[in-house]
Image: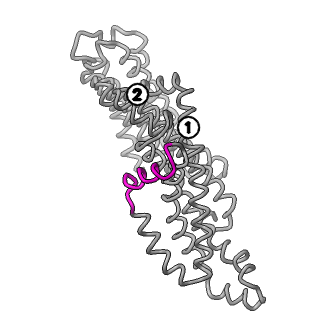
Amino acid sequence: MNPSRRRLGFILAAAGMFAAMVLPLSSEVAAALPARPVLLAFTLAAGLLLAIAAGIRGYRSVVPGFAGVLCGATTTLALLRDPGVAGSAAVGFWAMVLAVWLGAALCVVQLASMRPRHKASRRVLSLAIPLLFGAVVFYLWEVMVRGFGVSPVILPAPSAAAARFAVSLPTLGQDFVQTFIRGVLIGYAIGCGAGLLVAIVAQRFAFLGRGLLPLGNFFSALPLVGVAPIMVMWFGFDWPSKAAVVALVTFFPMLVNTLAGLSAAGHMERDLMRSYGADHRQTLKKLYLPAALPFIFNALKINATLALIGAIVAEFFGTPTQGIGFRISTEAGRMAIDMVWAEIALAAIAGMAFYGLVALAERATTFWHPSYRT
């Protein structure tokens, strides 16, 4: 980042904090910051820390910058506990919010531009940047919903969804087992395994590849809302119908990617295997499958998200009295939007964890690939 722009940004963030000390916090009757000594001290500390960050060069400005952001965020969240501010926030409050956002953005951009020498530092930084970015997003979501007084029926605050998540852990656990363990994992294994095996056979017999690809493309284009009711009629209301939908959704990406990967081996490598007198099984094991591993893992990562989406959508069309999709549908009908967001958070956490495990397996298996060379 341009040093002059970074310095100007921190100066503007500090000015926003200092301006909030004299501007009104609410359009209703509410005490100003000078009447709140503790919050006034936090606001003053935030402004001073951001001003100090503006005067420090390089990456060292991140430490006082983040300290000022934390002080400012603490002040704004504490102010929202006042009924006179929540839902009626005025220019002083939003000046602090803008200052927190600007300071956090400058710090995150500064961290993203860092190039540590040590591998451990790079890993910590690669984890810290998305976490900090997500924290800023949730902070802005919280203050905007509560500051503008948005109805929880339209959009609940993250704190309300988190509170509902905490008190509904037994129900969420049952939904997780029903949707993810039974529907997603079983369907994922069937669909990906079938796609891999069919691709291996199709690579051996070229006419199968030419015939199966258009057919697979046809099935992949079928809409879930049309396929799910049919699967429910065929396999019943329990998890087998959801696993069937997931298997159908994940089959074609695995087939296409594996076929592309099996064709990735060059002519020189194939000629070398023939010169060694290797048969097709040995060539498949030693050449084709290793060359196809990056493509196979690409399909596995794509299917990690598609499988969860397919299982949740399938539950909208018939399921026992549990499951993420079932709970989202029923709680939305009861206007319990905080529970809907808790289920969405559960699905997001499960999907990210599943994708992360597949990515770790890919890194452990295909460490030789050029994309992992540094």
In the foreground, 318 or 315: 318
The answer to if 86 sits in the magenta stretch is no
Q: Judge whether 192 appears above or below 24 on screen.
A: below
Which amino acid type is marked by label 2? Asp
Q: Is residue 61 visible?
A: no
Say whether residue 95 is left or right of residue 322: left
Spot occupied by residue 60 in the image (x, y as percentages of width and height)? 53, 39
Spot occupied by residue 136 in the image (x, y as percentages of width and height)? 43, 35
Q: Residue at x 41, y 35 (%)?
A: 328
The answer to if 233 sits in the magenta stretch is yes
| Quarter occupied by residue 24 | top left
* Residue, disc 2: 338
Which amino acid type is marked by label 1? Phe
In the foreground, 204 or 131: 204
Say whether residue 176 is left or right of residue 35: right
The residue sitting at the right extreme is 276
Q: Residue at x 32, y 27 (%)?
A: 145
* Residue, disc 1: 176
Query: Which mark identifies residue 149?
Result: none
Spot occupied by residue 258 in the image (x, y as percentages of width and height)? 57, 70
In the foreground, 274 or 370: 274
Q: Residue at x 49, y 41 (%)?
A: 348
Q: Which residues are magenta?
A: 222-237
Q: Residue at x 29, y 9 (%)?
A: 31
Which SS class for mark 2?
A: helix
In the foreground, 329 or 41: 329
Which SS class for mark 1?
A: helix
From the image, state whether disc 1 or disc 2 is nearer to you.
1
Spot occupied by residue 227 in the image (x, y as percentages of width and height)? 41, 55
Q: Residues within 10 Å of mark 1 (few under 14, many from 20)?
A: many
